[in-house]
Image (spheres, grey):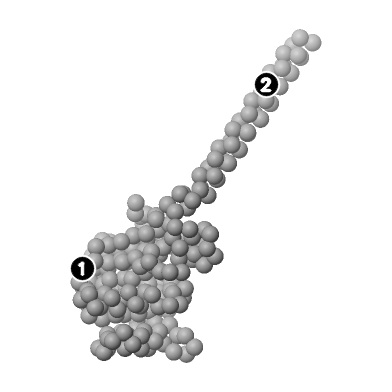
Amino acid sequence: MAGTYAKGGIMGNQGKSGCGCLVFILVICMVLVGVLIHPFSLRLMAKQMRYEDKIVPSDSVFVPRFVEDRNGELYTEAFREYWAGNCKAIYVEEDRIFGIGIADLVAKMAQTKGIKENIVKPVSAEGEEDARLTTIKEKFQAMGVKKVIILVPEYASRRFHDIFDSSRGQAKTLFMIKPVEVSYFKKDRWWKDGTSRIVFVKEVYELGSYYFSGFKTGQKRKIDQ
């Protein structure tokens, strides 16, 4: 009886110990979740998505297509770069809206801004976004363009830096990323704004897919700190 009691006592202590560990783990998980959803952490997440290069006068500015940019803020920023003397041509990723080419629309915008020169040029590619951007990168290199300023929303600048990273291989073209603050993305409270939340989650997915595709193809893709 004594042996049985002792054994039962030990098992009882083990059960209490196991419950204690489980409670401890749950508390740790709750603390981690609390930290992650804290506004400071959420703002930090947005800051980690931002990357910026030092901008120097270049041959061209390139504006990728962002359907969320309904007010054309990226194109307006391209005009500012032109007025500042930082480019001679503005390349836009071609697409069609109601049958009208993006390049034609941006050219008309340029005229309304007082730009008389024919500086807006289309550049296009087929496939998913990463494949299109890689093809466009190769097109700039094939054209012999030495320096290109790429204008993208702040939340997408990290991914575009990784895609257009000029330090890899024998780069013929220097690509410089310039993040642009756009009105539809509220970086300091993106989790509270519907549009901001959608574009941020989408960008996190696109960035993750880019790195994952590198693993599948055997390409080494580093995450910049």
Query: Is the residue marked by circle 1 packed among few (<14), some (14-19), or many (20+) residues within 10 Å?
Result: few
Q: Image point 37% across, 74% down: which residue?
A: 74
Query: Is the residue marked by circle 2 packed among few (<14), some (14-19), or many (20+) residues within 10 Å?
Result: few
**Alpha carbon separation for disc pair 1 and 2:** 69 Å
Q: Find residue 7 and report its image quarter.
A: top right
Q: Find residue 51 and report its image quarter.
A: bottom left
Q: Find residue 120 and report its image quarter.
A: bottom left
Q: Amino acid at mark 1?
A: Val
Q: Image point 74% across, 18% down: which residue?
A: 8
Quarter occupied by the N terminus: top right
Q: Is residue 54 above or below residue 38?
A: below
Is 220 or 77 nearer to us in this picture? 77
Residue 202 in the figure: left or right of residue 171 = right
* Residue beneath disc 2: 13
Q: Secondary structure at mark 1?
A: loop
Q: Is residue 100 above or below residue 12?
A: below
Q: Amino acid at mark 2?
A: Asn
Can residue 215 be seen? no
**Sequence order check, earlier mark of 1 and 2:** 2
- Mark drawn on residue 56: 1
Q: Nearer the viewer, mark 1 or mark 2?
A: 1
Q: Image point 54% across, 44% down: which residue?
A: 34
Can residue 157 be seen? yes
Is 16 or 90 nearer to us in this picture? 90
Residue, far top: 2
Q: Secondary structure at mark 2?
A: helix
Residue, far right: 1
Q: Position of residue 28 (x, y in %)?
A: 55, 37
Would you say the residues marked 1 and 2 are in contact, meaning their CB atoms lie under 8 Å apart? no
